[in-house]
Image: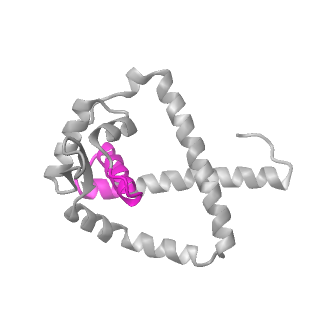
Amino acid sequence: MYRRRDTRRERLVAEITNNLRRYAVDAQQVGHAFANLHGLNPTDLHALIAVMDAELLGDPITPGRLGEHLNLSSGSITALIDRLERAGHIRRDRDTVDRRKVLLHYADQGAALAMEFFRPLGARTDTVMDRFTEDELDVVHRFMVEMGETLRTHRDEVRAVRPEQSRRPTD
């Protein structure tokens, strides 16, 4: 990490790694600003992102899958969902095929708050994306997908080493 970079490739890799780290920190700070503005804690925010991501993929998340994703116990997930539902951020719906299954969705009120807050960032993101060709975006997309997979694999390995210590209540 902190070694001499002699070749252009080594310098590019170092710069990209630093840019990814800074982007992650900056994105986390923006997320925390949204959370603080709306009385959410970091775990609440991660839950909302997971609910939104699942909906965007057309596969709404269940409380059990959300608990696995956040590495929380079923009791902690129930408390988190209750809190987010009371605040108008998410809603629970029964699956139309299997009525025993509960699906979590972004509630209209929560979606409106997020849209209002993140709309300026979306416009700035669109401006940056417009400066890249479709071929360049294909490469960036492939890079981001693979980096995300690498990060999630590492996260899962770290969780597997000491799962009892990573499970903690959200309150």
Q: Main secondary structure of the magenta part?
A: helix
Is residue 24 one of those drawn in magenta?
no
- Of 94 and 15, nearer the camera is 94
Is residue 37 one of those drawn in magenta?
yes
Label count reads: 0
Q: What residue appears at the point 22 percent right and 56 percent down from the top-left corner?
A: 89
Q: In the image, residue 163 lies at what x, y percent?
A: 42, 24
Q: In the image, residue 36 lies at what x, y percent?
A: 28, 54
User: What span is colored magenta in the figure?
Assistant: 33-60
Residue at the front extreme, as displayed: 97
Q: In the image, residue 22 lies at what x, y percent?
A: 56, 53
Q: Classify residue 13 as left or right of residue 98.
A: right
Q: What residue appears at the point 61 percent right and 61 percent down from the top-left corner?
A: 141
| Figure coloring | one colour
Where is the N terminus found, in terms of image quarters? top right
Q: Classify residue 104 as left or right of residue 28.
A: left
Image quadrant where residue 113 sits: bottom left
- Of 86 and 69, nearer the camera is 69
Q: Classify residue 25 as left or right of residue 165.
A: right
Image quadrant where residue 2 sits: top right
Q: In the image, residue 131 lies at what x, y percent?
A: 62, 78
Q: Classify residue 29 as left or right of residue 133.
A: left
Where is the C terminus found, in terms of image quarters? top left
Residue at the left extreme, as displayed: 86
- Of 93 and 165, nearer the camera is 93
Q: What residue appears at the point 36 percent right and 47 percent down from the top-left corner?
A: 46
Residue 165, above or below 19: above
